[in-house]
Image (tube, rainbow, N blue to C red):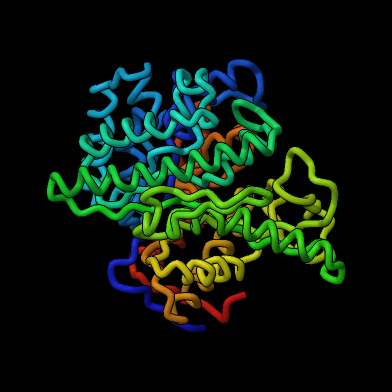
Amino acid sequence: MTEFVFPAGFLWGTATSAHQVEGNNVHNDWWAWEQAGRVKEPSGAACDHYRRFREDFDLAKQLGHNTHRFSVEWSRIEPREGAFSDEALVHYQEVVRALRERGLEPVVTLHHFTSPYWLARQDGWANPRVVDRFARYVRRVAEALDVRYWTTINEPMVYAWMHYLAGTGPPGEHDLSRASRVIEHLVRAHVAAYHVLHEVADGTGRQVRVGIATHLQPFLPCRRWWLPDRVVASLTHQAYNLSFLDAITEGRLRQPGKRPITIPDGRDCMDFLGMHYYGRAFMRWGALRAREWLGRRCDTRHHRQVTERNALNWDVYPPGIAEIIRWGARYRRPVFITENGICTTDDAQRERFILRHLAWVAQAIQEGIPVIGYLYWSLLDNFEWAEGYRPRFGLVEMDYPTQTRRIRPSASRFAGVCRTNTLQHTVPA
């Protein structure tokens, strides 16, 4: 058994997103998508977090957390184009205040998969004017909230894939060309937001650190012996994991089959690298399908390299979190694990998941890579988009009909690590 002490000031906590926990976000595109019957079940009241946030932050404090990442809901703040809601901005000011009163550092995400319905009706993120609209919204939020840590856009590549390739979220498209256009606009929107956040901070004397919250995933060949599978895995890694990060640090966006695009003012637009890790994906060569970037994904339920899965049959592979952290070292920015979690009804599996992944985070830190924090997804069970309420990610169990919260044993085990800043672990496995 080895004891590892995390760096002083390490950020410990959880993450949530507005639409998944607040409830009744009636002005965004996902709400309209749900009302049209395009999901297994609608979000409805969700966890009623919009009204119960103080109760939920009491739980986070009780569990030894010192940080909480949440998203502000654009459609609440700007329910009609150009019409900003002072009431919504005051609400999020109260959220920030409630966190600070409990000793929790706020980390604010400005876009987490949902967009105002008025924007969706203007072709959403496929419309180049979205960049200016997003920057305008970001400015209003930045002027209202005194926050140090910001993530501009949550999982931009997942957003493009889920909404414009897989079609599992609004507008439900299967168009690679449109997805590529959306990625370009997301890059430009991040760059614009980065500069706006720093400009507002400079004008008010605040200190801010602005990052991106990106999902990273090792892509392996389905058949290690088959060269075409290895090629498609490598190309997918470049396109999915690295292209966005390269664009906001180098100022050039490279996408397969397209000429590189220069992003004005796009160099060095990242103060920290927010990383999300859930597991690996396996790729095989095949005809390009509308629902994939390149090639085809293997069904991990039948893949011999996958020895553990979560309730959604996603691969569970703890060493992968150290692998993505090592990729992050190339960008020479502090790494922040802004999401890592498991959906399972077996809480013992959740506890093992957390401790094993933390052991690999500790390994990366020992290698000299600056990691500043770890946030588990999620504080609460929540609405998991197209999957509805069946997946259970929370450290806190939700009984949705009664809105009762119950702390799971895994949350208490994680709390011990958070309070002591120390992990007792064996060799990472």
Expressed as whole percent of the image width and height from the top left, the position of residue 289 reads 79, 41
In this view of the protein, which residue sits in the foreground, 168 or 390? 168
In this view of the protein, which residue sits in the foreground, 418 or 292? 292
Q: Judge whether 107 appears above or below 390 on screen.
A: below
In this view of the protein, which residue sits in the foreground, 402 or 243? 243
Q: Left or right of 72: which side holds 292?
A: right
Q: Left or right of 31: which side holds 36?
A: right
- Viewer can see residue 171: yes
Q: Left or right of 130: which side holds 161?
A: right
Q: Judge whether 267 appears above or below 143 on screen.
A: below
Expressed as whole percent of the image width and height from the top left, the position of residue 302 reads 84, 56
- Viewer can see residue 387: no
Q: Quadrant of residue 280?
A: bottom right
Q: Quadrant of residue 141?
A: top left
Quadrant containing the C terminus in the rendered view: bottom right
Expressed as whole percent of the image width and height from the top left, the position of residue 265 reads 36, 50
| Residue in view at x 71 percent, y 33 percent | 174
Expressed as whole percent of the image width and height from the top left, the position of residue 316 reads 66, 60
| Residue in view at x 52 percent, y 18 percent | 121
| Residue in view at x 55 percent, y 80 percent | 426
